[in-house]
Image (tube, grey):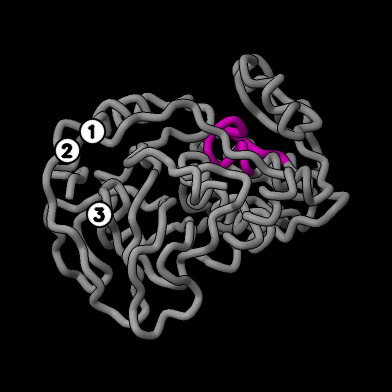
């Protein structure tokens, strides 16, 4: 099969080449024909890209852990999906991904593809959708009527978080450059602050939850805007527990985990019209090096997608 493989830990090491087609090895595994995946530009530097959790070295790993495709075959103990099902998933980071014509997923990672989305659109959801869902509801305990401040709101995670928080009945304050203000209001932001011209801590106070996707000084400046007992959740870098205690708030840093059940919930919200995928550009698989290079420059609105094959009308609707 044709695939993208990393030969070293930088963008020049990205290759479009022949790779062995995967086959089922475990009873809970599923072979998927891939239609689209997304770009995670930091992936060449991840520890998991080059070594499994068991410590085994990985050579020429295939990236792409967002997945939208069609089930080809299932292991003996798989009951939740069957051949011919259109599915989407976030797969674990320490094994080969979906930047290839075929990939292996686990049953626990796969959920039915939202009926209202094409494969290209669906591939933009799993990583950022699950990250936003887990940040807001699992770690952030967000409830209707609360106020949330979202940093980096126009990015992949931020743009989904804005929509989810709006759906949940929260008052949504977003930080973004001026060019993205109208866009974020359309997604459900109640207030938008231009981080380039305005210090958000001078405009915001007593919020219940801060979601940080930016890191650095933004985190340090966010403590003062939280009410006592509020929460600061970061998907960028670990947070000082000592500073959280000093300010009388809770904090958490986490790495997203695959979840079939949460993807099903996201799919329902998508098909009900509450959430839409945000895609800046779609690249054919062979142009992955250009897509990674563009993503590494930052300031992407939503996601960059790698399309592996054309959608088929019989499975996208």
Answer above or below: position of 160 versus 97. above
Q: Nearer the viewer, mark 2 or mark 3?
A: 2
Residue at left offset 84%, top offset 48%: 169
Q: Which element is circle 1 on? A: helix
Q: Earlier in the sequence, mark 1 or mark 3?
A: 3
Tell which of 244 and 177 is nearer to you.
177
Name the quadrant containing residue 281: top left
Q: Is residue 245 visible?
A: no
Residue that label 3 marks: 49
Tell me which corner region of the image, top left, top right, bottom left or bottom right, holds residue 151.
top right
Q: Nearer the viewer, residue 22 or 85?
A: 85
User: How many angstroms separate mark 2 from mark 1 (CA)?
Assistant: 6 Å
Q: Residue at x 67, y 54 (%)?
A: 136
Whether residue 150 appears in magenta in the rendering, the answer is yes
Rounded to the nearest angstrom, the CA distance separating label 1 from label 3 is: 20 Å
Which type of secondary structure does the marked residue at label 2 adopt?
strand
Give neighbour class at mark 3: few <14, some 14-19, many 20+ (Cα, 10 Å).
many
Q: Which residues are magenta?
A: 149-160
Q: Residues within 10 Å of mark 1 (few under 14, many from 20)?
A: some
Check if mark 2's residue and mark 1's residue have beta carbons within 8 Å: yes
Q: Residue at x 14, y 63 (%)?
A: 57
| Disc 1 target residue | 286
How many neighbours does mark 2 have within 10 angstroms: few (below 14), some (14-19), or many (20 or more)? some
- Mark 3: secondary structure: helix
Q: Is residue 310 left or right of residue 257?
A: left
Residue underneath mark 2: 16
């Amino acid at each position: 099969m044709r695939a993208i493989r990393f030969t070293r830990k930088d963008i020049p090491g990205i290759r479009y080449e022949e790779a062995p087609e995967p086959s089922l090895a475990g009873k809970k595994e599923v072979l998927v024909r891939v239609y689209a995946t997304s770009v995670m530009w930091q992936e060449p530097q991840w520890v998991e890209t080059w070594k499994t959790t068991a410590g085994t070295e990985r050579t020429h790993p295939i990236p792409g852990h967002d997945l939208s495709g069609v089930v080809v075959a299932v292991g003996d103990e798989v009951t939740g999906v069957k051949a011919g099902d259109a599915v989407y998933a976030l797969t674990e980071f320490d094994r080969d991904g979906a930047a290839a014509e075929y990939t292996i997923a686990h049953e626990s990672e796969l959920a039915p593809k939202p009926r209202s989305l094409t494969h290209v659109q669906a591939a933009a959801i799993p990583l950022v959708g699950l990250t936003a869902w887990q940040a807001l509801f699992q770690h952030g305990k967000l409830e209707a009527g609360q106020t949330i401040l979202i940093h980096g709101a126009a990015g992949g995670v931020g743009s989904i978080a804005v929509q989810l928080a709006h759906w949940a009945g929260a008052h949504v304050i977003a930080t973004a450059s001026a060019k993205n203000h109208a866009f974020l209001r359309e997604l459900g932001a109640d207030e938008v602050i231009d981080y380039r011209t305005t210090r958000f801590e001078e405009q915001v106070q007593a919020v219940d939850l801060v979601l940080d996707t930016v890191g650095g000084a933004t985190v340090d400046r966010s403590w003062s805007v939280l009410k006592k007992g509020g929460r600061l959740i970061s998907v960028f870098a670990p947070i000082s527990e000592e500073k959280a205690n000093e300010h009388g708030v809770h904090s958490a840093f986490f790495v997203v985990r695959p979840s079939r059940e949460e993807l099903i919930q996201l799919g329902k919200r998508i098909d009900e019209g509450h959430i839409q995928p945000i895609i800046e550009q779609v690249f054919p698989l062979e142009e992955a090096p250009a897509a990674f290079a563009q993503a590494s420059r930052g300031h992407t609105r939503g996601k960059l997608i790698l399309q592996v094959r054309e959608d088929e009308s019989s499975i996208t609707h």
